Image (spheres, helix red, strand yellow):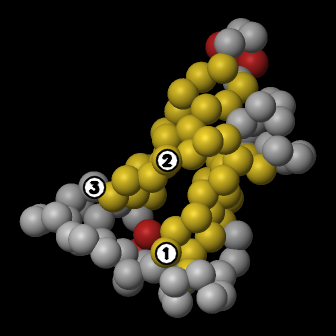
């Protein structure tokens, strides 16, 4: 993995996806061994209003927190889809940090 000056990378592989069955959600898993095994599922958000949810992208900030951006349906915004983001600290999630 290439590193950028000033960034602290989590040493675990991260996978995020949109769960398109109820409850409609954005989920994560972490792997300590490059995908040979995976930790428990972590639900970042479970308030999607339909199965139209997903395509997450992740980036780690210089402070170590991770930003996950995705699209989802939210009835409070009408029929349009929204682009949303969740920010978390992988060190606060069991088996998620360094």
Q: Is residue 61 left or right of residue 33?
A: left
- Is the residue under label 1 in contact with that under label 2 (CB below 8 Å)? no
Q: Earlier in the sequence, mark 3 or mark 1?
A: 1
Q: Check disc 2 and report its element: helix, strand or loop.
A: strand
Q: Is residue 58 above or below residue 34?
A: above
Give the image quarter of residue 53: top right
Q: Residues within 10 Å of mark 3 (few under 14, many from 20)?
A: some
- Residue at 12% over, 65% down: 6
Residue under the image location 21 percent in, 59 percent down: 62
Numbered mark located on residue 61 in the image: 3
User: In this rendering, is residue 49 above or below 36?
Assistant: above
Q: Residues within 10 Å of mark 1 (few under 14, many from 20)?
A: some
Q: Does any portion of residue 19 appear in the rendered image?
A: yes
Rendered location of residue 43, percent (x, y)? 67, 59
Residue displayed at 83% across by 31% down? 50
* Residue 11 pos. (x, y %): 38, 81
Q: CA distance from mark 3 to mark 2?
A: 13 Å
Quarter of the picture holding the N terminus: bottom left
Q: Mark number for residue 57?
A: 2
Q: Are marks 3 and 2 in contact (CB under 8 Å)?
A: no
Q: CA distance from mark 3 to mark 1?
A: 16 Å
Which residue does the numbered mark 1 point to in the structure image? 13
Contact check, label 3 and label 1, Cβ < 8 Å: no
Residue 63 rendering spot, x and y as whole percentages: 23, 61
């Amino acid at each position: 993995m290439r590193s950028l000056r000033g960034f602290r990378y989590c040493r675990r592989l991260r996978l995020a996806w949109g769960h398109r069955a109820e409850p409609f959600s954005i989920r994560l898993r972490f792997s300590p061994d490059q995908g040979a095994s995976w930790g428990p599922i972590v639900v970042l958000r479970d308030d999607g209003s339909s199965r139209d949810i997903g395509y997450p992208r992740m980036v780690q900030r210089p402070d170590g927190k991770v930003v996950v951006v995705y699209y989802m349906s939210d009835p409070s915004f009408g029929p349009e889809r929204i682009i949303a983001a969740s920010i978390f600290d992988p060190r606060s999630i069991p088996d998620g940090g360094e």
